[in-house]
Image (cartoon, coloured by chain):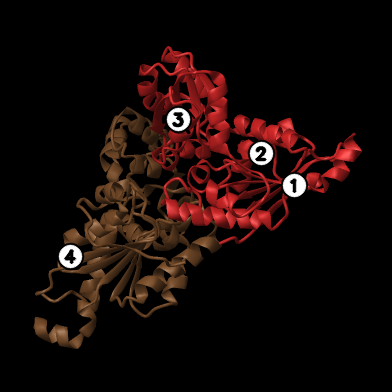
Chain colours: A red, B brown
Amino acid sequence: MKEIRSEANPDNSLPIGVFDSGLGGLTVVNAIRQCLPREKILYLGDNARVPYGTRSGATVERYARNCSEFLLNQRLKMLVVACNTVSAVALPAIRRMTAIPVLGVIEAGVRAVSISNAYRVGIIGTAGTILSDAYLQKIAEVNPDIEVYQEPTPLLVPLVEEGWLEGEITEAIIAQYLEPMVADEIQVLLLGCTHYPLLLKPIRKVLHLLGNRAAVIDSATCMAIDVENMIREKDLGAPDSATGGLSCFITDLPVSFQEVASRFLGETLTDITQVDIS
Amino acid sequence: MKEIRSEANPDNSLPIGVFDSGLGGLTVVNAIRQCLPREKILYLGDNARVPYGTRSGATVERYARNCSEFLLNQRLKMLVVACNTVSAVALPAIRRMTAIPVLGVIEAGVRAVSISNAYRVGIIGTAGTILSDAYLQKIAEVNPDIEVYQEPTPLLVPLVEEGWLEGEITEAIIAQYLEPMVADEIQVLLLGCTHYPLLLKPIRKVLHLLGNRAAVIDSATCMAIDVENMIREKDLGAPDSATGGLSCFITDLPVSFQEVASRFLGETLTDITQVDIS
């Protein structure tokens, strides 16, 4: 049966491409590798131009095309947009560039919200993601009765990159951001940024301290589930003999790269190439 | 006398060019306009590629050349590099591009430290600025007996951009960063980033609470003093009849632009043009 599938679909040994504006998407790669260890992954982090969240829509779309073109030129079976800002603004433009499945992190998060059956949902993300209202609109399409409470939380990305993943200051910043949502009695909190899974512990702690029992949904895990479902649906799984792997492309190589990348990925990156995609 | 100067130096009605990786350099523009209200200023903020502080040295130099080339093409009498990261890494490269005076914000800060006669000096800045050791080296050249205590403070830029310019969280973050320097009994604290003048008040408060009496030197004020001195030295002052002015070029136009820009400049920006310099 597996050999037949392999013959029927010659693309199943091709890699999955994943990109993000920086290194946050490595939390998505980490989650995909946990679920699908035999898949080969090509990751592109456009860290020379990070962050996308504060750019205009036109600039984000141009950057997203650069990233997609670079990865599509490597031949892929699936393209995963781990960047919330790009998913909010440029997914239709990317889908026009290719026939392979293109999965966006926002759709993955919205699907998880829908499955949760919550009707009061909080969403946090960068200013760009929240101000785009992309989550709000997608959730309204799926279920217009869900009430959405959004909050831009721009300090959380630098907090993660600084490595302040716990402690009083981190909790105080999170509490400052979450207090209005807790007053609105949210039942689910969706973390709409790939950096935020690293703050899961203090976010859960703060919600608990504020007396809220909302489930916390992180987009890295949602994205991995979506990738797994799409692979099953399209019969695109890597052959049983495949051993998987991760190759990482970045557009800049700052001094702290290895330290920050390992924090997101949960392991040390070995196969790294610096590229120019602009 | 003034007319003779005007004839002897036809360049004195040309503008002063100022650039930074983003909008922080508008604190320098603000300080220059306070000192020299008759000067015309062209400001370039490369906010499509901000922040420079986390990029590699080679990337920073390339970006710095783009910025300098754009401004030099407008004809200037002086070029002011308000960006600490560029001043740390790319000043010699910029000076090779032009014969007009090129002033860097690091040299301005070091001069102010030198004048203060302090021998235990603390410096805070972005990771890029601090890890470059540029302040350390320049201070050692001026006076090798000064002991320098450096600390990268990467959360302060996002804190300023979020507009959290006072309050408990802001003070707690500043205290976390300054405590080791206070233990080292610094006598002067140099703010090595153009964003930080907006945090002068909480920084002074935290130093006081920690029992330290260090003088706080901000680079925007130092830079304005250096510009004034250079204008006097080279006899480049605008004619008495000049009314000054500010034209602002930016490489991206995000939604929050006006709000953030006005916070740095202390007034509303009117003459804004979006340009592509890459």
Q: CA distance from mark 1 to mark 4?
A: 60 Å
Mark 3 near mark 1, Cβ–Cβ under 8 Å?
no
User: Alpha-carbon neighbours of circle 4 within 10 Å: few (<14), some, or many (≥20)?
Assistant: some
Can you identify the residue that label 2 sits on? A29
- Relative depth, front residue between A119 and B111: A119
Q: Nearer the viewer, mark 3 or mark 1?
A: 3
- Answer whether residue A142 is visible to the viewer in this image: yes
Quadrant housing the C terminus of chain A: bottom right
Task: Say the numbered circle drawn on residue B36.
Answer: 4
Three-letter amino acid code of the residue under disc 4: Leu
Position in image of residue A159 (x %, y %): 47, 36
User: Alpha-carbon neighbours of circle 1 within 10 Å: few (<14), some, or many (≥20)?
Assistant: many
- Answer whether residue A46 is visible to the viewer in this image: no
Q: Nearer the viewer, mark 2 or mark 1?
A: 1
Three-letter amino acid code of the residue under disc 3: Ala
Three-letter amino acid code of the residue under disc 1: Pro
Task: Say the numbered circle drawn on residue A140.
Answer: 3
Position in image of residue B246 (x %, y %): 22, 64
User: Alpha-carbon neighbours of circle 2 within 10 Å: few (<14), some, or many (≥20)?
Assistant: many
Q: CA distance from mark 2 to mark 1?
A: 12 Å
Do the residues marked 1 and 4 share a common chain? no
Task: Say the numbered circle drawn on residue A84.
Answer: none
Q: Left or right: where does residue B257 sit relative to residue B145?
A: left
Chain letter of the residue beneath label 2 in the structure image: A
- Relative depth, front residue between B68 and A240: A240
Q: Secondary structure at mark 2?
A: helix
Residue appearing at x 42%, y 33% in the figure: B176
Q: Nearer the viewer, mark 1 or mark 4?
A: 1
Can you identify the residue that label 1 sits on? A15
Q: CA distance from mark 3 to mark 1?
A: 34 Å
Three-letter amino acid code of the residue under disc 2: Val
Q: CA distance from mark 4 to mark 3?
A: 54 Å
